[in-house]
Image (cartoon, rainbow, N blue to C red):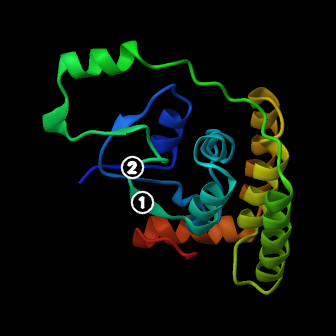
Amino acid sequence: EQFALGGGYEIPLACDLIIGNGKVGLPEKGLGILPGWLGTQTLIRRAGLEKGLWMILGAEIVEADTPWINIPLKKTELTWAKLKTIADNTKKRRFEPLKYNFAQKLLYLGKFFELWYKVKTGKEPASALLALQAIWRGNNQDLQAAAGIEWQAILAAFETKEAEKGIRHFLETGKHLYK
């Protein structure tokens, strides 16, 4: 089975079109860090706030299907003619800043207080709250400004004890420490 996880999924998220199969995900929270190649910005703009929060904050790995990718195709379905037709009909993707509606603002506030409590009680790594804040602050900016916001969150996450523990645990066991 094929996987595109972390940076291996974040690079395609910046593309106009994603064709593939297998599984995709942004499991960085399991290490005590957060997506760092614009995943907190491009996934939300592709899949929407609710689904993006679910994947990033849950460290979820899912089947490569809509909305996570544009076109799921198996290797046997990949032909030059088919790819050329798809490419010829592909529009340039725009990464416009998002405007949050009232329901999205409530969703964010609920998630913020839930994560704040879980971080304070040691049930979630601090990176989860940093990721949520980067998502909220960055996705209503242009992509260049959003990159700076995500970068600051990444630097802050790497300074936490949870990141050190999570990365060390992964290197020693091959498993994520935080679920």
Please report the residue visible at 57 percent of the width from the left and 65 percent of the height from the top.
Answer: 31
The residue at which mark 2 appears reads as: 65
x and y percent of residue 28 in the render? 57, 58
> Is 106 displayed left or right of 39 in the figure?
right
Amino acid under disc 2: Asp
* Residue 164 image-quadrant placement: bottom right
Q: Is residue 90 above or below residue 5?
A: above
Kindly state the secondary structure of the residue where label 2 is placed.
loop
Q: Nearer the viewer, residue 128 or 103?
A: 103
Task: Estimate the spatial distance between the alpha carbons at disc 1 and disc 2, rounded to whole Å.
Answer: 8 Å
Q: Is residue 120 above or below residue 85?
A: below
Please report the residue visible at 39 percent of the width from the left and 49 percent of the height from the top.
Answer: 65
The residue at which mark 1 appears reads as: 62
x and y percent of residue 32 in the render? 64, 66
Please report the residue visible at 48 percent of the width from the left and 47 percent of the height from the top.
Answer: 68
Q: Quadrant of the C terminus?
A: bottom right
Q: Residues within 10 Å of mark 2 (few under 14, many from 20)?
A: some
